[in-house]
Amino acid sequence: MITGFQLIEKYLNHFNVYNGKRKDQAVKSELSNKEECKLNVWYVALGGAIGATLRYFFSMLNNSLFPFGTLAINIAGSFLLGGITALYMTKKFKKEQLLFYGTGFCGGFTTLSTFSKETVELIQINAVHGVIYVMVSVAGGIAAGMAGLWLGSGKKKGAGVWTSSL
């Protein structure tokens, strides 16, 4: 049986590429690419476990027919991810922190699949409520993400991450 790491290594060997360079040109660092990949997987896994557990606890608080819990989780996660992205883009966060907090925690905390399921359920009960849920979720998520990006950049509009190409 092939492991995930062996599959990644096989893929990299197939294209003879490491870190965007030909294998024979790759610069050796303290950690091999395989070791770095293993560490990165752990950052994402640990962050994701914490995010998913927190989402589960928040989802238990909602007893309403309208999915306020998922709405709040996804908007809060969008805000956090915007801030985390800004911190990474302004060099205040390292790659490992981006993987743990952004990919792991926010990825485990937010949920597109539950949003989709709840949208279908709402549309079956009341189409208007389903459409409102989608509009508020998408607009709220984008607005929250932009607010997090702005706040995380620590600068006024027109400077920092706002003027760089995303």
Image (cartoon, rainbow, N blue to C red):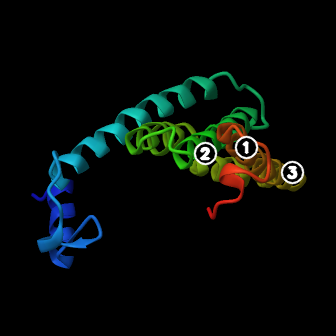
Kind of residue at disc 3: Ile
- In depth, the one of 110 and 103 nearer the eye is 103
Marks 3 and 2 sit apart, C-alpha to C-alpha, by 30 Å
**Quarter of the figure that contains the N terminus:** bottom left
Residue lying at the far right of the rendered structure: 128
Q: Quadrant of residue 48?
A: top left
Residue 108 at x, y percent in the picture = 49, 39
Q: How far, Cα to Cα, is label 1 from label 2?
A: 7 Å
Task: Indicate which disc, 1 or 2, sits on the residue closer to the N terminus.
Answer: 2
At 11% from the left and 73% from the top, the residue drawn is: 24
Q: Is residue 165 above or below residue 86?
A: below
Query: Mark 2 and mark 1 in contact (Cβ < 8 Å)?
Result: yes
Task: Look at 56% across and 23% down and name the residue there.
Answer: 57
Q: Is residue 103 above or below residue 58?
A: below
Residue 125 % position (x, y): 81, 49
Dot 1 falls on a residue whose secondary structure is helix
Query: What's the amino acid at mark 2?
Result: Ala
Q: Quadrant of the C terminus?
A: bottom right
Q: Locate residue 54 relative to residue 46 in the image: left or right.
A: right
Report the residue marked by disc 2: 86
Q: Residues within 10 Å of mark 3 (few under 14, many from 20)?
A: some
Q: Which mark is residue 150?
A: 1
Q: CA distance from mark 1 to mark 3?
A: 26 Å
Q: Secondary structure at mark 2?
A: helix
Q: Which residue is rendered at x = 70% and y = 59% of the image? A: 163
Tag 2 or tag 3, which sits nearer the N-term? 2
Q: Residue at x 14, y 59 (%)?
A: 6
Q: Is residue 75 above or below residue 57?
A: below
Residue 71 screen position, x and y as percent: 73, 39
